[in-house]
Structure formats: structure tokens, C-alpha cells
Image (cartoon, rainbow, N blue to C red):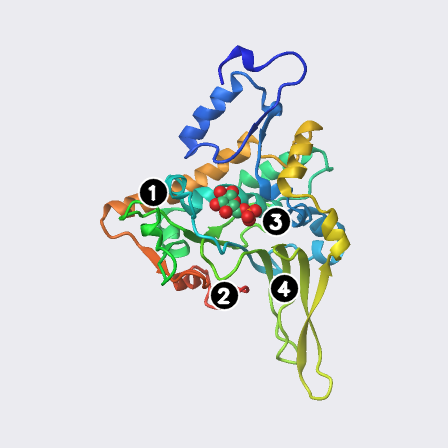
């Protein structure tokens, strides 16, 4: 990259696909090399999740609906849950995956970007500078978990085999004694911002029951006259069905009691046909020099600090010869241990 001939007159932009480094140290080194030829504003660190329709819908949903904006606080929100589940295994990417694992492959980038959009304060305006400033304000208050918190609120797992599929350890180019995780769950918290202190739980894994990327905003439930009411959870489904739904209570028709229905925000077939693919959208943004939906170096640095803390703890555990890696059956909901990461016994995964 230090080659003078890479850049010329006109505009010079460089697009970098993830993984941007392997940890903070290697990311810093890579960044330094890139900065030798390109200014920060000409570096586009791509995260294709930021190009997805429903991810781009998070800020408008939060900031244009008083109904939602007014409850976006620790008084109303019990927790937030982000699930990025995949049906596929590591396929032919065992070699790459061994250097990565779910934490680096999905949490360091996609999950953190989604979480940042969910927890950031309202930007001053919609310019790229203001959005990155609001994101940074939030990320400065990111809580880096200590070993004790990692033991309590994080789980790593590996998929087992079945009659027709390999266990992760049997996949091509994977070490038979690998401790690389194909599943990770954990907790993210911020000290500042509209949801300061609210637990944000995440999980991601290969060989789940189905492909599903979704966010559940779990609202606090107050007992009421009818006793059986459900909490008004808000779900943003990123994929495969792009939709938002809000759980709402009403009366049953012919008997006493409360029924639960979903108010849904969906797209017609014609509208779906208009929605560009994430990469398509982001490549367009690069040409028009819009860096709103790209990762700034200072954001990336915070994400790596968090991931490094978890990775360091897991590597220490590996060295004891007794790593806690939950094994899970393919094509179900991941390891059962992921149900134990919550702060209180009344919390549970909404998407089961
Ligand atoms: C990539 C990961 O960034 O995202 C892959 O490297 C993963 O392992 C993919 O399969 C998931 O993206 P999507 O858009 O299919 O949810």
C-alpha cells in the first residue's frame, strides 16, 4: 500500500473489506499502512450490514416516531436482543474461519454496527460527520467486560455433526482440536446514551434452524388490571423477511381475557423488488463520496478493544486445557448454555 503509484490525480478512494485486522494491534498496523497513502476520509471500511434496508431503517424508526422515541430509555426498555443466525456451516471457508471464529467474523463488525445504531444518541443532523460523532460519543462509553463478566454473560459454542453433515472439527482445513467458536453470545453495555445501562444481548452462529437476522426490543412489563397482558416488544426483522412488528394486547372476542396481536410494517412484493443489495448500495455511496454507512477508524478501534478482551479471556481458558466450549446440535437454536447469559431470571430470548 505504501506504493506512490497507487494514487494519482483526481480522487483516490480505497475500499477495505473485513476483516480489518485480527485484533487491535494488527488493525492499527494495517491502518497506518493505509494512512501512508490515503486520508481517513478516503478510506471506506465496508460492512455490508450497513447497506441493508432494515439496518438503514433503525435511525428513522427511532427518531421519527414519538411512540418509539419516547420509550427509548432504561425506564421502558428491559433489554435489547440481536440475533444473527445462519443456516449455513463454514462451507469451504474453514481455513479463513479458523483464524476468525464468530466473534471476529460477525460480532466485531455486523453486530457492533447494529448495536451502535440502536444505542447512539440522536445526531445533530443527518450528515456523515454528525452521525459518526454521535456514534463515537456512544462508543467512548462502551463497557469493556472483565474476565468475571465474560464468564457470566458470554458463551462460545461449536456445532456437532449429523448423519449428513460434518461437525465443525471435521470440516476441511479445520484443526481436529480447534477451539474456534462457530457460535457466540454475550452482553454489550454503554455508560452513556439513551439506553445507558440497558443490557444488549447478542448471539450469532452457524448451522442454526434457519437464517434469521433480527432485533428484539424487549419492553418492561407492568402488571395491569387484566393480569395476562404481554409486553409491547418491538421486533425489527432484517432478514429474510424485512419487517417491523410491535406486539400489542387487545380483548378476546367471545371469552374474557387478553389476546396478543402484531402490528406489522411490511413491504409489498413490488417494493421489495426496488430494494438494492447491501453491497450495491454501499458501492454507490463510495462513488458519491458518502461515508455515512462506513466504519470510521475510531469506531473500529473500540470494537476491537471489546473483542480483544473476550478473546484474551478465552485464550487464557484454552491454556488451562479445559475450555468451556458448548457443543450444539446442527439446525436447532444453538447451545442451550446461551439461555444462561442474562442478568436476571426473568429475561429470556424472545426469538426461540
Ligand atoms: C460475512 C461473514 O461477513 O457475513 C460470513 O464473513 C457470513 O461468515 C455473512 O456468512 C453473513 O451475511 P448475510 O448478509 O448473509 O447475513
Q: Secondary structure at mark 3?
A: helix
| Residue at the disc numbered 2 | 348
* Residue at the (32%, 51%) spot, across then down: 170
**SS for dot 2:** loop
> Is tag 4's residue or tag 3's residue first in the polypeptide sequence?
3
Rounded to the nearest angstrom, the CA distance separating label 3 from label 2 is 19 Å
User: Mark 1, residues whose alpha carbon is within 10 Å: few (<14), some, or many (≥20)?
Assistant: some
In front here: 159 or 115?
159
Which residue bears the numbered disc 1? Answer: 173
Q: Mark 1 or mark 3, which has the lower sequence index?
A: 3
Provide the residue designation for mark 3: 118
Q: Look at mark 4 in the image and give the residue it sits on.
A: 233
User: What percent of the width, then of the height, locates residue 203?
Assistant: 48, 54
Disc number for residue 96: none
Task: Determine whether the residue tagged by mark 1 lies in a helix, strand or loop.
Answer: loop
The spot of residue 82 in percent (x, y) is 54, 54
Q: Is residue 25 above or below residue 278?
A: above
Residue 111: tell me if it is visible: no
Amino acid at each position: 500500500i505504501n506504493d506512490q503509484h497507487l494514487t494519482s490525480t483526481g480522487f483516490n478512494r480505497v475500499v477495505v473489506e473485513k476483516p480489518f485486522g485480527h485484533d487491535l494491534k494488527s488493525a492499527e498496523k494495517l491502518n497506518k499502512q493505509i494512512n501512508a497513502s490515503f486520508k481517513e476520509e478516503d478510506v471506506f471500511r465496508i460492512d455490508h450490514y450497513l447497506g441493508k434496508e432494515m439496518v438503514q431503517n433503525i435511525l428513522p424508526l427511532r427518531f421519527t416516531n414519538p411512540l418509539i422515541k419516547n420509550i427509548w430509555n432504561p425506564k421502558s426498555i428491559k433489554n435489547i436482543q440481536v440475533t444473527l443466525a445462519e443456516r449455513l456451516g463454514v462451507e469451504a471457508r474453514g481455513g479463513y474461519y479458523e483464524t476468525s471464529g464468530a466473534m471476529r467474523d460477525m460480532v466485531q463488525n455486523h453486530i457492533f454496527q447494529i448495536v451502535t445504531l440502536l444505542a447512539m444518541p440522536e445526531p445533530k443532523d443527518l450528515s456523515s460527520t454528525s452521525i459518526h460523532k454521535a456514534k463515537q460519543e456512544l462508543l467512548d462509553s462502551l463497557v469493556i467486560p472483565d474476565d468475571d463478566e465474560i464468564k457470566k454473560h458470554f458463551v462460545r459454542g461449536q456445532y456437532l455433526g449429523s448423519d449428513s453433515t460434518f461437525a465443525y472439527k471435521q470440516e476441511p482445513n479445520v484443526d481436529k482440536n480447534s477451539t474456534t467458536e462457530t457460535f457466540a453470545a454475550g452482553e454489550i453495555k454503554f455508560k452513556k446514551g439513551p439506553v445507558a445501562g440497558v443490557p444488549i444481548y447478542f448471539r450469532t452462529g452457524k448451522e442454526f434452524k434457519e437464517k434469521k437476522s433480527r432485533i428484539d426490543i424487549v419492553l418492561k412489563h407492568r402488571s395491569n388490571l387484566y393480569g395476562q397482558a404481554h409486553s409491547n416488544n418491538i421486533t425489527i426483522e432484517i432478514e429474510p423477511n424485512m419487517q417491523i412488528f410491535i406486539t400489542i394486547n387487545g380483548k378476546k372476542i367471545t371469552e374474557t381475557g387478553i389476546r396478543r396481536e402484531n402490528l406489522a410494517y411490511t413491504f409489498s412484493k413490488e417494493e421489495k423488488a426496488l430494494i438494492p443489495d447491501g453491497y450495491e448500495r454501499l458501492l454507490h455511496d463510495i462513488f458519491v463520496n458518502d461515508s455515512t454507512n462506513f466504519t470510521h477508524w475510531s469506531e473500529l478501534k473500540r470494537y476491537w478493544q471489546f473483542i480483544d478482551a473476550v478473546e484474551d479471556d478465552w485464550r487464557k481458558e484454552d491454556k488451562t486445557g479445559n475450555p468451556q466450549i458448548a457443543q450444539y446440535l446442527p439446525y436447532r437454536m444453538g447451545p442451550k448454555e446461551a439461555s444462561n447469559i442474562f442478568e436476571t431470571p426473568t429475561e429470556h430470548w424472545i426469538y426461540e
